[in-house]
Image (cartoon, rainbow, N blue to C red):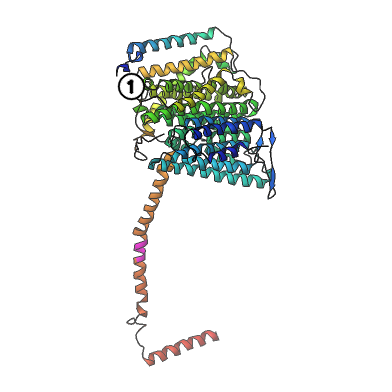
Amino acid sequence: MTVNPALLLIAGALPIPLLTGRARAAWMMLLPVAAMAALWTLPEGVHGGFGMLGLRLEPLRVDALARIFATAFLVAAFISMIYALHLRDRMQQAVIPVYASSAVGGALAGDLITMFVFWELAGLSSVFLIWARRTERSYRAGMRYLAAQVVSGLLMLGGIVLHVQSGAGLEFGFIGANEPGGLLILLAAGIKCAFPVLHAWLKDTYPEATAVGTVALSAFTTKFAVYVLARGFPGTGALVWVGVVMACFPIFYAVIENDLRRVLAYSMINQLGFMVAAIGVGGTLGVNGAAAHAFADILFKGLLFMSMGAVLLRTGTTKGSELGGLYKSMPQTMVLCVIGAASISAFPLFSGFATKSIIMEAVAEEHRTAVWLLLLFASAGVFHHAGIKIPFFAFFAHDQGHRVAEAPLNMRLAMGLAAAGSIAIGVAPNLLYGLLPYEMDYSAYTTPHVVNQVQLLLLASMAFTVLMRTGLYPAEIPSVNLDADVIYRRLLPRAWRTGLHGVTLMRDEVAKPLQRRAGRVSTAASRPFRARGWLGVPWSTDLMVLWVALVLGLILLISLL
Amino acid sequence: MKDDHRWLDEPRNVDRVVRGLYILCALMFLADLLYAKHPFFDFENLFGFYALFGFIGSVTLVLAAKQLRRVLMRREDYYEEPERTDDDG
């Protein structure tokens, strides 16, 4: 019997609001495990494809690329569920498996229609994780989030229609950006994958979700989009530079951003940039690198968001300007956060080292010097903001006097799992390499590579130390920084208001005087016809006869001519 | 609270940590003497390339970002009033 792991997750989410106490906790932990078992007992190939309206649907297709992404999503689901165990808000607990199922189902979709259904479900289900904060602010953020997701969905649908019309069929395989349908699909994925300028929704709304919500959000939507790119657009050259821009510009923002969860949102775009660039390079190493890094990113970015979620839960804030010295109250969270920081920074023995290096290797083999140098710069930059800034300003820096409890046990357990996974991938990368879509002959642990990476990171940390001690490092200031979201949060509303104002002004200044003048003209013109006008007064009979004779004579004259 | 004062609260100890880091960095810089590189690019053969790149790249990043603040930074309530909630979870 074949069971679709995604449908299992959705069905399993239904009883969560009804269960209580330990039964609910046990059910929540069991659900992703059962889905994982279902996934790994499925043999490769298409299961239960059928025809509908002349189109071939394949809702369940397993191959190596689908399997590694689905596995990563299920691991993330398991960790997020544990992280959510302490909640009394059952809505969030029920939404997480549905949201996770959308990414799992998308990864296992063999046709574009099925993929589209899960693409929409991802957006519609996850918005509740933002609204779950139940504030005015989060309501508005959720609406902005939903708008971005819906636009992406519409583009995806339009793209699929054009793609099928062009005769390419419904199969979800290589799509390519050569025809309009493919371009629209690429654009739809670009929104969810946070391409430059299209990225604003991510840094705008992820940090507005609940402590638990942001953790779940960080895993699924963007990596689902990475999967769509890896499946549909490997080797699309333009993606290399898109990825480079994504890797580089957010690190500047991350250095000056005050909200540490927003710093992580920027660093997420930065990590996605590495994956997108790798997909652009394509080939064995490129696609493998993107898949491996997506897997590792789900763990370490989840871990970092979880540590900041714990800080938010305990102190009520994640602003760098209000935090510091938390290592005294939350030492375990601090250690786990540092493990996440080391993983994202790609320290040897941590996961990022084993996965990001595949991407660097793929770029180097293509001799893309400028791309490689910029990605190396972004690597140093990620260490700066995610590796040092996050742990330093939250747990060290100036002690702000927060004396709080350590994170709840379930949160520490979830973070511990993610940390263990990150270290396992770092120490024994072959565990992960074995799951990758293509066979490759690659080893991350060569002497030059280890030494060079340590040199890069240590000297980057020395730069931080020097700048900190000389006072050149920009202080954490309560502020917001203008980014592309200024377009829809400021410029468009302002343009709309200006437009409305302009219309009112036109009415008062132009339309009304015109109306008045037209009224005067029509009064003047109609005056002769009114009762006292010269045409309106009673005429004498002889004058009438004279006029009739004149008119008749004129007509006679004209007809004779 | 008594346990408030930790080892790291002593500036002298922070200096020690920093000095340790500097020594480590110097050692790593010199580590280029000890192994053979197999570079993809010629510039990787430059002595201490990765170390220099890491240091200069980071300083450039931070100072450039600091300058960007002049253009980009706005008050915290630029978009909307900040909201304080304690009921997170």
State yes or no: residue A51 in magenta.
no
A155 relative position to A335: left or right: right
Q: For the N terminus of chain B, which image quadrant?
A: top left
Identify the residue at horizontal 47%, vertical 28% (top origin): A267
Pick the residue in front: A59 or A183. Answer: A59
Q: Count residues near mark 1 (Cα–Cα under 10 Å), then give few for <14, some for 14-19, many for 20+.
A: some
Read off the residue under disc 1.
A399
Measured as percent of width and height from the top left, residue A315 is found at 36, 29
Measured as percent of width and height from the top left, residue A454 is found at 51, 15
What type of secondary structure mainly makes up the magenta span?
A: helix
**Which image quadrant for residue A101?**
top right
B46 relative position to A398: left or right: right
Measured as percent of width and height from the top left, residue A557 is found at 51, 86
Pick the residue in front: A265 or A58. Answer: A58
Identify the residue at horizontal 36%, vertical 34% (top origin): B86
Q: Give the magenta range.
A: A511-515
Residue A298 visible from this viewpoint: yes
SS under mark 1: loop
Q: Amino acid at mark 1?
A: Asp
State yes or no: residue A513 in magenta.
yes
**Which image quadrant for residue A368?**
top right
**Which image quadrant for residue A240?**
top right
Identify the residue at horizontal 54%, vertical 21% (top origin): A351
Query: Relative to B82, does residue A513 appear above or below in the rendering?
Result: below
